[in-house]
Amino acid sequence: EDTTCCTVALFSGLVFATMTFLAPTRLAIVCSAAAAAAAACASADAFLVRPQLAVRRTTNQRGNAAPFSPRFCPGRMPMPYHAVREDTTTVPEGMVVASKTDELNTKKFLEEMGKNLSTLNAGTSQTEHEPTNDGEGLTECVDIVRDLNGRPLPVQYFAEALDVDDAVAYTCPESEAFRGLMSNACRVRLIPGGQTAFYKRIIFENLDHAKEKLKSAPYKLISDSKSYEVVAAFLSSKACQMVSEEAGVRIPKCLDARLEPNKANPIESKFSFLLEDLPPSDGWYQRWLLRDMDECEAALTTLAKIHAYFWNGSSFWDDADAARELEEGVWESSDYVQMKRNPTHCAMVAKKWETERLKCKEELSGFDYWDNLGSRLEAVAVDVGLRAHPFADDALSESYQKYRTYCHGDPKQANFLIRHGPAPDSEIQLGLIDFQWAGFGLAACDVAHYMTSAVHADRLVDGGEDVLLRYYYDELQKYLVEFGAFPNANAAIQNYSYSTFMEQYDTGFLDICRFVIAYAWSRFEPVEDDDEEGRIRTMNKNSYNKSVPNAVWLMTRCDEILKSRGA
C-alpha cells in the first residue's frame, strides 16, 4: 500500500506540478496536484505522529538510527517534487505556474499587491535595522529551502504544516535569512496569505566550520550532531508544552523535524527543522546586545521561570512520564562551554592569553593583570570547570542535586526575540529559541553565561551587574515557591541563599573566561556601536567576540573574582 501511494503521488506530481526560478532575483514555487495524489497521500496516516512534532524512525545503510523520515510531511505523505511542464505560461515578475487556474489566481494576487512580490517582505528587519533594497528586488535563498537530499521543497510542505489551504507559492528572501557557522535558515512566506514559518537546514558536509571541526576536533562534531537531536526531543516533549502553558515561557513550536545523524561518520549527518515564526511583521525583533533595562530584566525573568519550573523538587517532577521523557531527551549536563566538551582547554589558557590579549592590547595593557591573568586562571581552570558543571562528573553530581535544574545552555542575546505591547506600559514579551545545548545544570551558571554573552557593557559597569543579579535572584525566589520547589519564601531562601547563588555564579563566570581565552577569542571581530553593517554581520556572536568594552569588562571581572579567591 505504501508503494502504491508513492507511485500514484509521484506520477501525479510529475504531470501536474512545476517549479521555476524568477529571474534574476526572485523565487516563487507554484504547485497544483491532482485529486488522485491528494487522496493517495491522505491515506498515508502512518507517517503522522503529533501534536507538535512529526517523528518517523528509519535506519540508514550503515545501520544508524535515523529518526524522522526525509519523505515525511505533517499530516500526510508530502506532495512529490515537481517537474516543469512544456506548456507552462508566464505571469508578471517571471513566475511560472502549473495551470491556467493558478495563473489567473497568481495574476490577481500580484495585481492587488502592486505586481511586486517584494511588498510581501514589508516591515522591520529582525535586527534593529531596516533591510536594504537597491530597487532591483531582494534575492532569494534558494539553496536553503531544500530537503536533506537537496531537492527544492514544494509549497505543500509549508502549506500543510501551517494549515493553509489556498497557498500557491512561497518566497524566501535572502534579506531574512540566517547563515551561521553550523546552520543556515530562512523565513518562508506563503502566497497569497502571507503566513510565515522559519526553516532551518543543517548539512554538515556543506559547512566549512563543520569540516574544520572534523580535522581539528572531531569529538565536537559528534556533540554538534547530538545537539540537534536534543532540540527535537525537547521541542516535542511534554515538558516543553508544560513550561510554555504553566510558566508562560514563549517557545516557538516545532512544526516538523527531520534528523539523519550518522554516528559512524558525523560529517554526513543532516538535519532540518520547520519552526513557528516570530516575524518582524508581528512586532518581534532581536538586539545586537541587550542594553535597555526592561529588556534585560525580561530575559532574566524568562530564565528564572525556566529554572524554577524544573528545579529539583518542583511540581513538574510529580509527572513521572514528563520527567522521564525530559531526562532521556536532553543533555545530562548543559552548555557547550563546559570542560567535558573541551578537554584540552584547561592546559591552554596561559599560552593563549599571551596571544589573544593582543587583540585588545590598547585597552587591556594598562591593567595589572596584563602579564599574569592567563596563568592565574589556568591554575584554577580544572576545579572551576568541574564545579560549574557538576552533573558532568559522577563524583560531584550527588552533592549538587538539590540545586539541579533545566538550563538553556546558550542564552546569548540572539536567542531572545523581543516584542513590546501596544501600550507604553505593556509587559515585554520574550520568545526563547535554540535549545541545542539545553540540559541539566546550575541556574547560576546559566545566568553567568547570559551576563557574559548577551548584555551590553554599558549595562554591567558601575554596579549594573549587581543590580541585574539581584533582580534575577528575587525573580527566581518568587517562582521557586509558585512552582512548588519550596513551600514558602523563607524555605526558598534557606535552601538557596544569595551567597550560594553568587558563589556558583562566580564559578561559572571563571569557567566561561577559560573558554573565551582558550578558544572563543580566535573569532573576535570588534564592532563599534554605530557600525550598522558590522552589527548585522555579528548579530549571532557573543558579546566578548564583538564588543571591546565587553571584552574589557569580562577580563576585569575575571581578575576581581580570582583575587577574591586568593588566586
Image (tube, grey):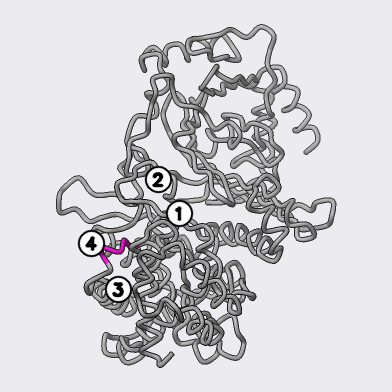
Indicate the quadrant where residue 345 lies: bottom right
Lower sequence index among marks 3 and 1: 3
Q: Amino acid at mark 4?
A: Met
Name the residue at 67% across, 50% down.
204
Q: Nearer the viewer, residue 329 or 542?
A: 542
The residue singled out by tag 2 in the image is 534
Q: Residue 323: x and y, percent?
A: 53, 73
Q: Main secondary structure of the magenta part?
A: helix
Q: Quadrant of the C terminus?
A: bottom left
Q: Residue 301: x and y, percent?
A: 31, 67
Distance Cα–Cα, label 3 vs label 2: 31 Å
Q: Is residue 417 left or right of residue 344?
A: left
Q: Nearer the viewer, residue 93 or 481?
A: 93
Nearest-to-viewer mark from 3 and 2: 2
Distance Cα–Cα, label 1 vs label 2: 9 Å
The residue singled out by tag 1 in the image is 525
Distance Cα–Cα, label 3 vs label 1: 30 Å
Name the residue at 38% across, 51% down.
527
Q: Amino acid at mark 2?
A: Gly
Helix, strand or loop at mark 2:
helix
Indicate the quadrant where residue 391 lies: bottom right
